[in-house]
Amino acid sequence: MFSKKVTKLNVFDLKKYKSLPSPEEANEELKKKEPEFNELLEKVMDLTKKRNIELGLRLIHGHDTPLEDGQAMVENFGTFQDKPALITSAAIPNGKTYPASWILSDKKYLVFEYSTDTRVKQVYERLLEDSSALDEISAYIRQYNLDSLVGPCITAREAMTKFNMGQGQILSEHTTMLNEKHVNIVQSRQNKNFLSDSIKTLWGAQINDFVMTVPCYCTPSQHIATISEQSGPVIVKPFDNIELRLPVEVLMSNSTYKKRRDLFLQGFAMVQSRDASDPRSFYAVAGIHGQPYQPYDDDKKSSDWNKSETNRWGGYCHHSDILFPTWHRPYVLLIEMLIYEAASELIKTYPASSETEEYKKELEKLRFPYWDWASPSTLANGVPSILFDEYVYIDYPAQKNVKIRNPLRAFTLPVDLGSLILVGDVSNPTQRPYNPEATTTPYTPKGYSTVRHPDSNYISNQDATSLSVITFCSTIFRPTIYQVLLVDKWRQFSNHGDGLLEPKNENYGHYASIEVIHDAFHDSLGGAGGHMSYPDIAAFDPIFFLHHCNIDRLIAIWQACHPDAWFIKNIKDLGYTYPELEDNPNPPELLRSMLRYYRPNLYLQYHWKLTLTVKKNKVRAPFQIRVFLDLPTANASTPTSSPNFAGLVSIFARGKETLCANCLHNLDSKVVNGSVDLTSCMERLFINTSPIPSGVSDWVIQNIEPSQITLVAVLKDGSGISLEDAGLMTAYYWMFDEGPDFDPDYKNRSKRIMGQVYPSVNKS
């Protein structure tokens, strides 16, 4: 290792340079060590993100350009055939040239190439002050015994701002003659051609405002930020054939679907790797849901909120209204279509073979998977490991067991998301400890990944996430879905925002809308500071679309159970279906089977529920109202692992800084009607759930009193607020008699309001 103050980064050894292998030889040798190189590259990318420094790797090889004494290879920005180019040629380094890449020789750094680029200068000067990041990369290279083929390099180029990276473009390098000299030319060209033509070295690809250089044989989906080859407006179209959307656990683990799985993972990775300006990129699609509040695909006429406001974009939000379910259906279809198209592009690069034909057949069956977070499997095991695995292994016809970064784990932001000014230093992920502010949407700097239940070091906590999901699964997900399936009116099923509902008069289950359960999952998965917990940034976590695919599944099941409830769209017309609906089941039979599958208490006749109404935007931030039984001292610090914890209602509200026109237009009018099933907690505390006759006709003695139910409002940072400040309007609790024979028709059941919890009333 060199000392911290480096003085020997500017040494060029002509003899060493002339001994380097040709590009073809170096490339062939590196292919033999592809697994090692892939691991090395992932480590380097992780390191550079954490250290926030623009360094990378490049193939070390000789050039056709002859060098004389005193000369080295120097890169300049210019034009070639009237197009922008980086031109590297033999020249004498001077005070305006800066080392851009190095050869590792023994324990020394020898310059491979110089550059005149000002961004290279900035990074080089930073390395002169502290070379520790460069030293770590070099140690990694030596650890994998790749120092004869790969060297560290500066990836920043100011010149990249002058390249016109159009649809399907990458950067590639070739050698040619210019003014009777051998020169190396780097220019943009079509991505689709680079694997099949005579290019010997893929020089790099534009990733926002810098360049990451990689060897040419790397698959585009692995390491290269590209712009998709399709042009024109993005139009969501139905698939030609009907195929199953599978549970993500099945798609990832069942060998029957191995090729389909690999196409899905690679296609998703390709969509995530596209430039942020590409409407077919993951960044652009995720941005439809909130930040950065820009029209999608240059569609400046589609926002239907606050038409009088012309000075800002108000977004596409349809939370808290009857379009909530149907709005998200094409949203999932969009990402599904883009992954399918990306996988189709990938197959075009495969060699002609019988195995390639098998991949083509599996492509036609490729649909987006869902994760049923209320399943018995989730209740037992929490979050599937595939959603947290850092790497996955995929196959190509020509290569097997190739290691790539898992696109389901997280998404790395290509640009800053949010505003650091709004959140301050404490909520800045680049500062330690990381501690998200209570009422502001977290800021995510460029180069940082989405997180779930992040710790103080801004690292996703897998154990905390799984524990949260398991807790929600038992106390909220399963009881609420059970209620959702019983609702037979679209107005009540579709959203939680109907302010016209009368708490004492509406039918059973109306507080359990599909949006209520949707909100709860966002809350459980994101945690404090995790992207999924905040509406403006939730869609940037890849799990968002697995979640919404499951929400779409529940909507489709509900529609099949209640075919006369409203207008019904047959999802098979869109080219997909779900396992429960594949054989067109009879509605009553489907309802009965789904109720049994999700019923939280299979053998209980009587169920107790708390229903509450909250002003959604009173706090102007996401928060919870937690419910405890027989624990009057419960507060914001009381853990949800307490045996007295009965459940909660999640308020999935946008932060105070949001630009969402729908939310700002309805600050006072939107409410959340939610419910908590008290039954399991009552059993756990040995509170009788069966009615106790009073001896007076049609009356029962209270099993629990209102004073035994404690409500606690908790912000995302764990601090508490008063119920009044949280916007709580009413809270009642009920007893339901579902009958001894489990009648799925809730209209045949009896219900009784047992008491009012909020506002509290004095017992006369």
Image (tube, rainbow, N blue to C red):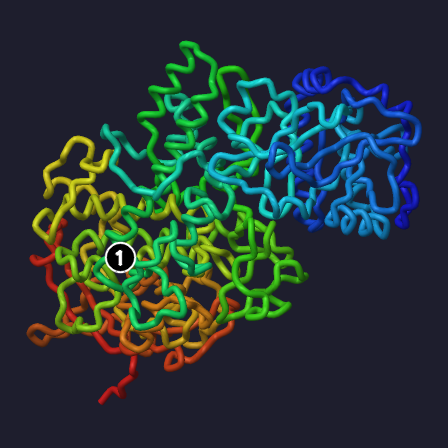
- Seen in the picture, residue 650 relative to 713 is either above or below; the reply is above
Query: Residue 723 vs residue 148: left or right?
Result: left
Quadrant of the rendered structure where residue 39 is?
top right
- Seen in the picture, residue 538 relative to 361 is either above or below; the reply is below
Estimate the x, y position of residue 485 in percent, counting from the top left.
19, 51
Quadrant of the rendered structure where residue 591 is?
top left
Q: Residues within 10 Å of mark 1 (few under 14, many from 20)?
A: some
Residue toward you, 384 or 522:
522
Q: Residue furthest front?
A: 179
Residue toward you, 397 or 277:
277
Query: Residue 99 vs residue 528: left or right?
Result: right
Residue identifier under label 1: 324
Q: Does residue 663 show up?
A: yes
Quadrant of the rendered structure where residue 650 is?
bottom left
Q: Residue furthest top?
A: 354
Residue toward you, 137 or 605:
137
Q: Amino acid at mark 1?
A: Phe
Q: Residue at x 75, y 18 (%)?
A: 22
The mark total stands at 1
Query: Residue 693 vs residue 53: left or right?
Result: left
Q: Residue at x 61, y 32 (%)?
A: 81
Estimate the x, y position of residue 396 in percent, counting from the top left.
50, 20
- Seen in the picture, residue 439 relative to 160 is either above or below; the reply is below
Query: Residue 732 vs residue 247: left or right?
Result: left
Q: Does residue 135 show up?
A: no
**Quadrant that contains the N terminus:** top right
**Quadrant that contains the C terminus:** bottom left
Name the element at disc 1: helix
Estimate the x, y position of residue 140 in percent, counting from the top left.
76, 34
Estimate the x, y position of residue 387 in percent, counting from the top left.
48, 41
